[in-house]
Image (cartoon, coloured by chain):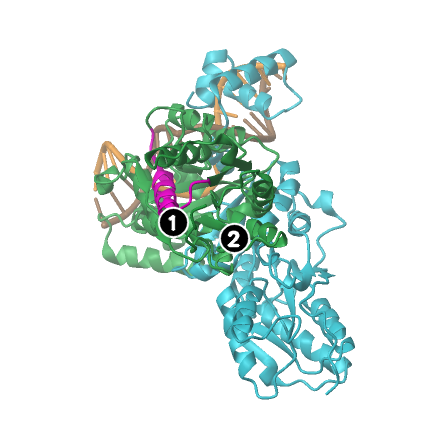
Chain colours: A cyan, B green, C brown, D orange
DNA sequence: CTGAAAGCGCTTACAG
DNA sequence: CTGAAAGCGCTTACAG
């Protein structure tokens, strides 16, 4: 079965009626509709999306841009796959399909997005990994493509975003550590321009201040957000003269490499050195001693992202009048044993 | 800038000429082309894909279907993100874009694929996780959509596929173990109908036979392909009366749960019990003792998949006349310490 | 080298 | 309730 024309011919009715029947329009005789539906099912006919899109001016497809660079692959830890389910649960209500658009590692993310947007392959976009200055946000605003980001940015002063509660993470981690006697508290920060690094370092600085601890720039360890980066971070931490007694990690997988490097030096996490991890990753769950870290539901985040996005799309706005505001997504502390010891006062 | 019409009007030439200039046709005055290109760049004009697709009958998009079920999320371990880079390196040569199509967990994969294919959102498909009987293969064959699968299947007797060398893995693992004195060799197998389970068990059985060891069905441990499944597998292994001395795992992350359960019982991997893992996963790399397992390049697999697919697409066939055959993808053994001990003869 | 026109497969006002 | 027709944005034979 090629197209609607053939189907109409077979049924001996006009293509207009076939289209109306298929699209559930009310002004179709029920018997006619039944015949059309049966024939479509029989021949496996589904409307060609290009034809529909061209006519309707919308594709009914939402894009989720992801970066497939080697580093991202190593690190992504299924963040996107997790969010995807939540997104789809929202989109399914409106017969919207989600496609993931992987930006090749050798292509500039801005140019890639520009191309995808200009070709009108999607009606709206979800982007993540926002940079401190992120031209993609300007691009989407300018092109009037509805979008939502995972992560804040300095670009554009108002746009739809949801971001993790780095402030809360820094607060609770520092408080917990101070209560246990720690004063020399290190953190890791990404070496890239990704915005969350700035937010996290600033949150950490303020948390220290509230607890009367001076900010020491040498305790901010800048490394790649990867297992390897964790290894590197431990290496650097061990070299610091007045060695900190704890490190707070920004990225989930870092804990793996960090543990390894510490153990190589006979420094036992949770006994000789405290560690608080970031997001509770499945693959960090095996660590011994168990990692104290923060937890969140990727599915729920996906749902929130979907609702926020639709709240900004004229065609769906009405269903999401209560959504659309920016959200600081909370994380819950999961106490492990990696920071279980009390520090004896020196 | 809305469309080609506005651009043509601005330049005061016909839309046909604009189109030809933009598409690199030779029959365009160079000065005209320059002006068109400059204006397109200035206004950020890129041809609407629906218009192009409709006219040309192709979308220039290749779909990679992935399953985003909770289990898949837990397990995927970035297999797809890894393959993606390789695929894109091939597709980029022909200006083809790759999109990932995540099948919602509550939708039947067959119906999902049918819908995507019928709507003609992609020119070709890559599917994976092939089942022993997989109707998706019949569907794609019937609809004449070029495709390639990651994994063999009993459906259709000939179709383009690439599969991992489970036979080689079973062979080398068994041989290595037998050389070290093992006779009671267990394996894990997926509890689902995924085809690789059948292939792996059969390969294992033949490898045993070649080494004069009787196949014992009770040594085939059927568990979920997940970290949790590994835990479960260890649990079952420990209960077997005439306990095996080694287990060969089918899935990369199983090793994590398996190690944990063994250690909980005071059974030390690599000393009291041997383990050979499957694919070398980044997140299994931290295991102590280091896991003996198999390694492959996801990128290279992606390249091969891309080439095989294009070899089956009329428009690109000519460039890939040497490709297109089915491939058994080799894996290389990476010796760790999880199976390092010699078994003293009882 | 360029323009005018047809047509890809749909959906939808409009007329009846 | 149905049909005939317009038109979404492109590309491409065709004529000049």
Please give the residue where the numbered disc 2 appears in the rendered image. B272
Which quarter of the rendering shows the C terminus of chain A? Answer: bottom right
Judge from the rendering whether residue A282 lies leftward or rightward of residue B333; answer left or right. Answer: right
Q: Is residue B19 left or right of residue A168?
A: left
- What is the quadrant of residue B40 in the picture? bottom left
Measured Cα–Cα span from mark 1 to mark 2:
14 Å
Q: Residues within 10 Å of mark 2 (few under 14, many from 20)?
A: some
Residue B321 is inside the magenta segment: no
Q: Position of residue B240 (x, y in %)?
A: 57, 38
Instruction: Pinpoint residue C9: horizontal percent, then vertical percent.
Output: 44, 28
Q: How many marks?
A: 2
- The circle on residue A257 is none
State whether residue A154 appears in this view: no
Rendered residue at 60%/50% (across/down):
B261
Mark 1, Cα crowd under 10 Å, few <14 / some 14-19 / many 20+, is some
Which residue is at the front of the view, A284 or B65? A284
Residue B137 as seen in the image, left or right of residue B309: right
- Secondary structure at badge 2 equals loop
Q: Considering depth in this image, is B219 or B300 the residue closer to the camera?
A: B219
Q: Residue at x 53, y 38 (%)?
A: B242
Q: Is residue A196 above or below residue B140?
A: below
Q: Residue at x 44, y 38 (%)?
A: B128
Q: Nearer the viewer, residue A201 or A219?
A: A219
The residue carrying mark 1 is B180
Mark closer to the chain start, 1 or 2: 1
Determine if the magenta segment contains residue B178. Answer: yes
Q: Quadrant of the N terminus of chain A?
A: top left
Residue A82 place in picture, x, y as percent: 60, 49
Q: Give the residues drawn in magenta, as a range.
A: B159-184
The percent coordinates of residue B98 (x first, y second) are 42, 46
């Amino acid at each position: 079965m090629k197209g609607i024309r053939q189907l109409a011919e077979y049924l001996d009715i006009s293509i207009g009626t076939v289209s109306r029947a298929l699209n559930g329009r009310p002004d179709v005789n029920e018997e006619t509709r039944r015949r059309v539906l049966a024939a479509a099912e029989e021949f496996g006919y589904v409307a060609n999306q290009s034809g529909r899109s061209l006519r309707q001016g919308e594709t009914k497809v939402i894009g989720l841009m992801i970066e497939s660079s080697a580093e991202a692959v190593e690190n992504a830890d299924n963040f996107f796959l997790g969010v995807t389910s939540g997104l789809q649960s929202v989109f399914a209500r409106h017969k919207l399909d989600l496609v993931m658009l992987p930006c090749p590692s050798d292509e500039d993310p801005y140019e890639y997005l520009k191309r995808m947007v200009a070709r009108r392959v999607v009606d709206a976009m979800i982007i993540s990994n926002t940079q401190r200055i992120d031209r993609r946000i300007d691009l989407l605003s300018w092109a009037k493509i509805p979008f939502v980001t995972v992560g804040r940015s300095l670009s554009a002063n108002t746009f739809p975003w949801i971001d993790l509660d780095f402030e809360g993470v820094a607060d609770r981690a520092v408080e917990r550590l101070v209560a246990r006697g720690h004063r020399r508290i290190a953190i890791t920060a990404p070496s890239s321009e990704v915005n969350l690094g700035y937010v996290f370092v600033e949150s950490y600085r303020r948390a220290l201040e509230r607890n009367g601890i001076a900010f020491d720039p040498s305790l901010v360890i800048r490394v790649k957000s990867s297992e390897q980066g964790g290894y590197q971070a431990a290496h650097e931490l061990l070299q610091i003269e007045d060695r900190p007694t704890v490190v707070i990690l920004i990225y989930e997988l870092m804990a793996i490499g960090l543990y390894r490097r510490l153990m190589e030096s006979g420094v036992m996490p949770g006994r000789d050195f405290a560690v608080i991890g970031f997001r509770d990753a499945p693959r960090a769950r095996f660590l011994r001693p168990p990692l104290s870290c923060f937890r969140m539901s990727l599915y729920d985040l996906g749902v929130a992202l979907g609702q926020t996005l639709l709240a900004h799309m004229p065609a769906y706005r009405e269903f999401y009048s209560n959504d659309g505001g920016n959200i600081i997504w909370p994380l819950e502390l999961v106490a492990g044993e990696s920071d279980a010891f009390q520090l004896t006062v020196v």
